[in-house]
Image: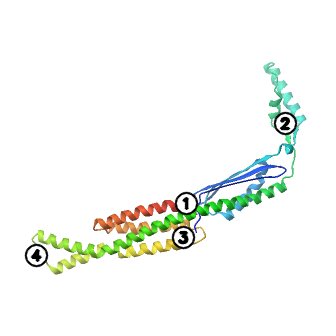
Amino acid sequence: MPQSMTGFARLEQQNALGFWSWELRSVNSRYLDLHLRLPEELRDLEMKVREILRKRLSRGKVECTLKFTRNAAEQGLNVNSERVDQVLAALQQVEMQMGPGQATNPIDILRWPGVLDTAEVDLTETKALMLEQFDLTIDQLIEMRHREGSALSEQVQGRLEKIDAIVTEVKGLLPSILEHQRNHLKHKFEELHLELDADRLEQEMVLLAQKADVAEELDRLNVHTQEIRRILQQSEPVGRRLDFMMQELNREANTLSSKSIVTDTTQAAVELKVIIEQMREQIQNIE
């Protein structure tokens, strides 16, 4: 069963160090397009995360976000006294040049880069837990993409049935179309008061039959719909193959339209094009 490229997944977890969450969003794309947002202190996980995503997904624009909040007890903030002295000295120098101003707010000093040092904490075990949970998040994403893919497959199958019905109807009309054209030619001869030449009439009908012969196109449409059904049963990524099959269906519909000599086949060709375009839009979301 095909898999959609549209999906969403979010999982949360915590341990003694803090709380974190993974969030995955995916939409359709011609290729696998990865966008990762990870906290700076967990940036070393990026290569591993990309590797996991490439192994488990083939196509789609995927946005992956990891959020991590340490527990208050684990913040371990230390004031860098040397850095504070440097900042204060710089402030005094500015005041000497510009004149005394407002009193310096200690909070502003703390916000200065390098004034607060975060205590080093061993995140090895936490990172391992995060990667385990990341696998589970991808499982959830893939499960949703499978559900979406199943729904898309059913919609495509329904439109394939409509195509088969149109092909069957046109095939059934072909003999009556040719008979109608024969009578139409005879009527034209009579209107023009021309002597009806049986041989000439047969020649005209042969030419007309050759021009209006769409049996081959109708047979190919049947072959293509059967091939699409076979592709939809496969578990591997099939989006590109299905997209190619839409081009083949559209080619036959265009030929049917160009060979049309009555409104019935013209309308059938138009309806085929509408159905094929609807399927093509759905298939754009299949991996």
Instruction: Tell which tag, 3 or 2, sits nearer the viewer.
Output: 3
How far is mark 1 from mark 3, CA to CA? 13 Å
Q: Could you say whether the residue bearing mark 3 is in a helix, strand or loop?
A: helix
Indicate the position of residue 69 as horizontal and vertical percent values. Answer: 78, 46
- Which residue sits at x=55%, y=60%? 285
* Mark 3 or mark 4, earlier in chain: 4
Q: Which is more toward the observer, 230 or 34?
A: 230
The amino acid type, in three-letter code, at marker 3 is Leu
The amino acid type, in three-letter code, at marker 1 is Asn
Mark 3 touches mark 4? (CB < 8 Å)? no
Indicate the position of residue 242 as horizontal and vertical percent values. Answer: 52, 67
Indicate the position of residue 170 as horizontal and vertical percent values. Answer: 34, 71
How far is mark 1 from mark 2, CA to CA? 50 Å
* Mark 2 or mark 4, earlier in chain: 2
Residue where numbered disc 3 is placed: 232
Q: Quadrant of residue 276?
A: bottom left
Instruction: Tell which tag, 3 or 4, sits nearer the viewer.
Output: 3
The amino acid type, in three-letter code, at marker 2 is Val
Residue where numbered disc 1 is placed: 285
Residue where numbered disc 4 is placed: 195
How far is mark 1 from mark 4, CA to CA? 62 Å
